[in-house]
Image (cartoon, rainbow, N blue to C red):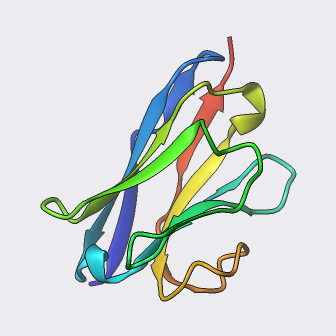
Amino acid sequence: QLQLVESGGGLVQPGGSLRLSCAASGFILDYYAIGWFRQAPGKEREGILCVSDSDSITYYADSVPGRFTISRDNAKNTANLQMNSLKPEDTAIYYCAAGQYCSDPTGGGMDYWGEGALVTVSS
């Protein structure tokens, strides 16, 4: 069964940090581009950033560079999203996805999606 599962979501205060993990099963994540997306309450899903299969990083959201970083842990077949300096407007359900390419910020290049992890930034 091909599956992605996010973990690490939760409640964090403004200015804090959180790390999300995305674990793959049934396929080797290193062979794929990995994207992170989010959907805030009442808003459409937006792309955050993506790492290609050759480890080139594409930032979709202007607010992300300098705060969010993506990495792979091939030994664990996972990908991580490190989020620093979090703001209340970062509150959303965060999704990881794996696919063929990063060029579509709407996620059109992704084949597999996780079910999402809720991140709440609030004091």
x, y (%) of residue 28? 23, 79
Answer above or below: position of 62 versus 23: above
> In the figure, is residue 89 to the left or right of 98?
right
Residue at 65% in and 25% down: 121
Q: Is residue 35 visible?
A: no
Left or right: 68 with respect to 53? Answer: right
In the picture as drawn, the residue positioned furthest to the top comes out as 123
Residue at image position (78%, 34%) is 89
Which residue is at 63% across, 31% downward?
A: 120
Compared with 102, 16 (above or below) is above
Residue 33 seen in render: yes
Residue 77 place in picture, x, y as percent? 21, 65
> How many labels were placed on the picture?
0
Q: Percent x, y for residue 31?
A: 30, 83
Residue at 22% x, 82% y: name it: 26
Pick the front one: 22 or 117: 22
Q: Is residue 89 left or right of residue 94?
A: right
Quarter in which the C terminus is drawn: top right
